[in-house]
Image (cartoon, rainbow, N blue to C red):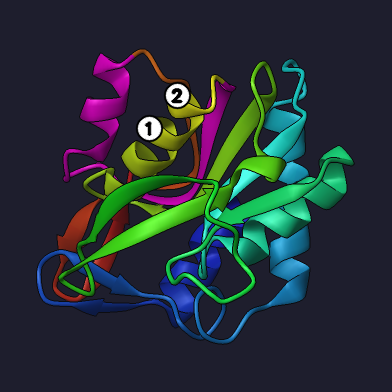
Amino acid sequence: MKILEQRIKKDGRVLGKDVLKVDSFLNHQVDPELMQAMGEEFATIFSDEKIDKIVTVESSGIAPAVFAGLALHVPVVFARKNKSLTLPENVWTADVYSFTKQTTNHIMIDHRFLSAAENILIIDDFLANGQAVEGLLKIANDANANVVGVGVVIEKTFQKGRQILDERGVRVESLARIKGFENDEVIFL
């Protein structure tokens, strides 16, 4: 998606050899017009699938997921990272390691919001090592839901996430695919 690649080149910041900071438009401050364009792009890409719900992990996946849900006219469910007093005991759970935060989160989705035989599309902000998506796949499997695909805003192809999902036979569609970083610049595929 050219508009996303241009925005990454303009406002993304490379940190070290494997981290891209996009907090000015995706995961701290959000550009709603860009999110809308990405949501519409995901809707176009997955127009051949029957989708009942979109599932993501809080918090950076929520904005692109909501705009994809808007474009597809389906609800969005996000896996929570923290149990609140209002969250019931009946939840689907998975442990997810965060590459950028170097911590493991215990994510959960209320049973009421993910049911057997529902067709779900997973949306996430980044695909690096695939841990967030793996956690959502586990939850979907536990709920007997059908994952029709994974939509990723930014994929770092030099990390193992795509390979893991390809080996599982999961359809992955990324809006921007990064080959690597050179001289603090992003190199796209």
Q: Is residue 51 left or right of residue 168?
A: right
Which quarter shows the C terminus?
Answer: top left
Percent x, y for residue 127? 35, 48
Residue at which label 1 appears: 138
Q: Is residue 147 left or right of residue 37?
A: left
Q: How dense is the environment of label 1, judged by Cα within 10 Å: few (below 14), some, or many (20 and up)?
A: some
- Which amino acid, mark 1? Lys
Q: Provide the residue span drawn in magenta.
A: 145-168
The local secondary structure at tag 2 comes to helix
Q: Nearer the viewer, residue 87 or 16?
A: 87
Q: How far apart are the two marked residues, 1 and 2, measured between alpha carbons?
A: 5 Å
Q: Report the number of discs.
A: 2
Residue 103 lies in the magenta-colored region:
no
Q: Which of the labelled discs sits on residue 141, or is there none?
A: 2
Q: How dense is the environment of label 2, judged by Cα within 10 Å: few (below 14), some, or many (20 and up)?
A: some
Percent x, y for residue 147? 55, 23
Q: Is residue 125 visible?
A: no
Residue at x-position 58% and y-position 52%: 2
Percent x, y for residue 130? 28, 43
- Which amino acid, mark 2? Asn
